Image: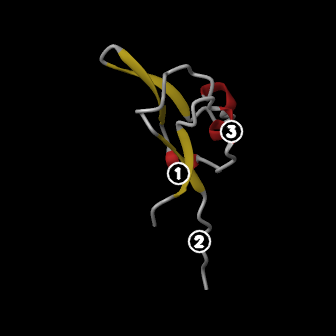
Amino acid sequence: MKTSRQVPNPVIDTARCTGCGWCVPTCHLHLLSLERQGWEKFSVLSNADACTGCTKCAVRCPFGAITMQPSPD
């Protein structure tokens, strides 16, 4: 029987994200980056499959814009 381990992934609420970038250096796998959308910038997760679910980015975000949610099956 094969069991799959569900790793929670960061979900970024762009309504709360200010683009401060404090979360970006906390990801030791370099999966987060800032991207421009018009005149604003937001944090973006580049490869959800590579995320280990460590929660460092969510803890570091001073605006509560990152929550950890189970990855879809």
Residue 34 placed where, x, y %? 48, 23
Which numbered dot is residue 4? Answer: 2
Q: SS class of the residue under badge 2?
A: loop
Residue with the most extreme left position: 38
Residue 46 placed where, x, y %? 48, 37
The local crowd at label 2, few if under 14, some if 14 to 19, many if 20 or more residues have their Cα within 10 Å, is few
Q: Where is 2 relative to 23, above or below? A: below
Q: SS class of the residue under badge 1?
A: helix
First along the sequence among labels 2 and 3: 2
Q: Give the mark count.
A: 3
4 vs 43, nearest the viewer: 43
Which numbered dot is residue 61? Answer: none
Residue denoted by label 1? 49
Tell me the amino acid under the disc marked 2.
Ser
- Gap between marks 3 and 1, in whole Å? 20 Å
Which numbered dot is residue 59? Answer: 3
Q: How is the image coloured?
A: secondary structure
Tell me the amino acid under the disc marked 3.
Val
Q: Where is 52 relative to 41, above or below? A: below
48 sits left or right of 52 in the view: left
Q: Quadrant of residue 21?
A: top right
- Gap between marks 2 and 3, in whole Å? 25 Å
Residue at left offset 52%, top offset 36%: 65
Residue at left offset 60%, top offset 80%: 2
- Gap between marks 2 and 1, in whole Å? 13 Å
